[in-house]
Image: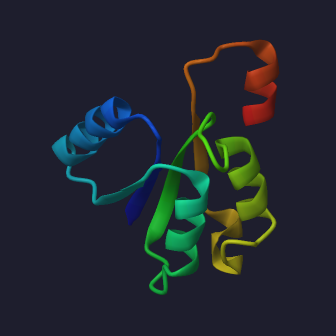
Amino acid sequence: MKILLVEDSPVNQLVTSALLETIGVEHSVVDNGLLAFDLLINDKQHDIGLILMDCHMPLLNGFKASKLIRRGYADADHKITPIVALTGNSDEEVKLMCL
């Protein structure tokens, strides 16, 4: 299984990638929701088993990207791929949006 990290912050990309490499997890990194869609649509082997999605990104934020993935726009097989929200915001409204 491969993890897709969708994160626009270069520092967060480096830190998260280093942690994933430390535990031996293969992963891909893209920096916005549109690039995530492109990767998921072209994921012919369907080896993306988990998506780590930043909530606040330019072009297409994590909330909208997650909704579109769940509706099958990225690929029908990815409608059920687990998505973990990444955010530094602990506001109750954001927590509910993530759930």
Is 9 on the left or on the right of 38, as rendered?
A: left
Q: At 78% from the left edge and 14% from the top edge, which residue is drawn? A: 92
User: Does 64 appear above or below 98?
Assistant: below
Q: At 81% from the left edge and 27% from the top edge, which residue is drawn? A: 96
- Coloration mode: rainbow
Is 17 on the left or on the right of 99, as rendered?
A: left
Q: Is residue 99 visible?
A: no
Quadrant in which residue 38 is drawn: bottom right
User: Does 97 appear above or below 3?
Assistant: above
Q: Residue furthest top?
A: 91
User: Does 94 appear above or below 64?
Assistant: above
Which of the pair 59/94 is nearer the observer? 59
Q: Residue furthest bottom?
A: 44
User: How many numbered marks have been drawn onto this rendered protein structure?
Assistant: 0
Q: At 71% from the left edge and 67% from the top edge, which residue is drawn? A: 79
Quadrant in which residue 45 is drawn: bottom left
Where residue 15 appears, x then y in whole percent? 28, 32
Q: At 38% from the left edge and 66% from the top edge, which residue is drawn? A: 1
Quadrant in which residue 29 is drawn: bottom left
Q: Residue furthest front?
A: 59
Please state, as top left, top right, bottom left or bottom right, where the C terminus lies in the image. top right
Q: Is residue 41 visible?
A: yes
Where residue 69 appears, x then y in whole percent? 71, 63
Which of the pair 76/65 is nearer the observer? 65
Where residue 10 appears, x then y in whole percent? 34, 36
Where residue 23 appears, x then y in whole percent? 21, 44
